[in-house]
Image: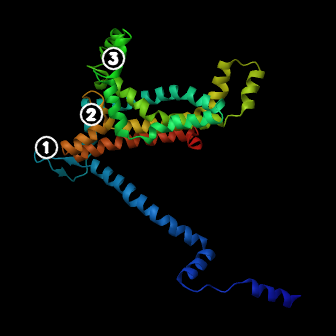
Amino acid sequence: MTALTLSSAKTSILPGRSGLFGRMSDVFWRHPELLLFLMLTPPLLWLGIIYIGSLIALLLQSFFSIDDFSGLVNYEFTLATYAQLLSPTNFDIIIRTVAMSALVTLASALIAFPIAYYAARYAQGKWKVLFYLGVMLPLWSSYLVKVYAWKLILAKEGILTWLFEELHLSWLLDGILNLPVVGGNSLSVSYLGTFIVFVYIWLPYMILPTQAALERVPDNLIEASADLGATPRQTFRTVLLPLALPGIVAGSIFTFSLTLGDYIIPQIIGSSRLFIGQAVYAQQGTAGNVPLAAAFSVVPIVIMALYLSLAKKLGAFDAL
């Protein structure tokens, strides 16, 4: 029995394969951790050197200052550049950008929830396919094409103004444009127009995570809530909304961060008042004040770090 076992063991172990690729295959089979290391090293090096390295370089630039006389960068450690962010003009830019990001996120959540709820609870078969096509189709077109299309729609000679005239509601549009903060000469040069385009562009990023979260809500929980005498409003407030909240927060990560860092939409549609992205572009490209541009760039990073830590506590990452 022992001799038979030894003979079977000898015949079951194949000899090593010849050739370079054969020997490499044998080594990777015996040491799978080596293969994992070789596969992960290139992307980790790219992430560490190109992405994180550039962020570190950006952070270091923000601790320098610009010489007022020569216009050259003074490579001495200082917090004076960050102090400039607290000046009324620069601080208004930060507040304006954060407020717009919060409003866009809130509006996207309010619009996305009923759409996502219908798709998750009622849409079946071809209707669900149409839902995904309707949500994803705008993402397949060019970002700039969509923004410039909205520029034409919201312009004073655009189709929206024509529609208000045909409906004899020009007085309503004029009243909106005469509002002190959100108005302007036309919707295409107003905060309201910027807000509308932001919501349109980022809305799919809110719908999809919300819909995924709602699909994971068991039907029996909603039925049990109704059996226990809860009204639809109470069921929504105590059952549906808490379970869907991680998906809403996950979508808000996209809408909030993308609005926070965008500079193309406010550049094309909106007033002359700057957002953070425009300030970074202006300081780095026009004024040549790289330290102040770097300090402005750090602001969204800090805000999003705090936002992501809060979103993690709310379980948003489980809904992505």
1 vs 3, front mark? 3
- Foreground residue, 120 or 133? 133
Identify the residue under disc 3.
162
Earlier residue among tags 1 and 3 = 1
Q: Are marks 3 and 2 in contact (CB under 8 Å)?
A: no
Q: Are marks 1 and 3 in contact (CB under 8 Å)?
A: no
Q: What residue appears at the point 19 percent right and 42 percent down from the top-left corner?
A: 286
Q: Which quadrant of the structure image shows residue 179? A: top left
Quadrant position of the C terminus in the picture: top right
Q: Would residue 303 appear left or right of 62 to someone viewing this image?
A: right
Could you classify mark 2 by the number of other residues whose Cα lies within 10 Å: few (under 14), some (14-19), or many (20 or more)?
A: some
Quadrant position of the N terminus in the picture: bottom right
**Disc 3 and disc 2: Cα gap in Å?**
38 Å
Identify the residue under disc 1.
68
2 vs 1, front mark? 2
**Disc 2 and disc 1: Cα gap in Å?**
18 Å
Q: Which quadrant of the structure image shows residue 194? A: top left
The label shown at residue 90 is 2
Q: Amino acid at mark 1?
A: Asp
Work out whether residue 95 can be spotted.
no
Image x and y of residue 226, in percent: 74, 22
Q: What residue appears at the point 39 percent right and 43 percent down from the top-left corner?
A: 301
Earlier residue among tags 2 and 1 = 1
- Foreground residue, 151 or 203? 151
Dot 3 lies on which element? Answer: helix
Q: What residue appears at the point 37 percent right and 58 percent down from the top-left corner?
A: 50
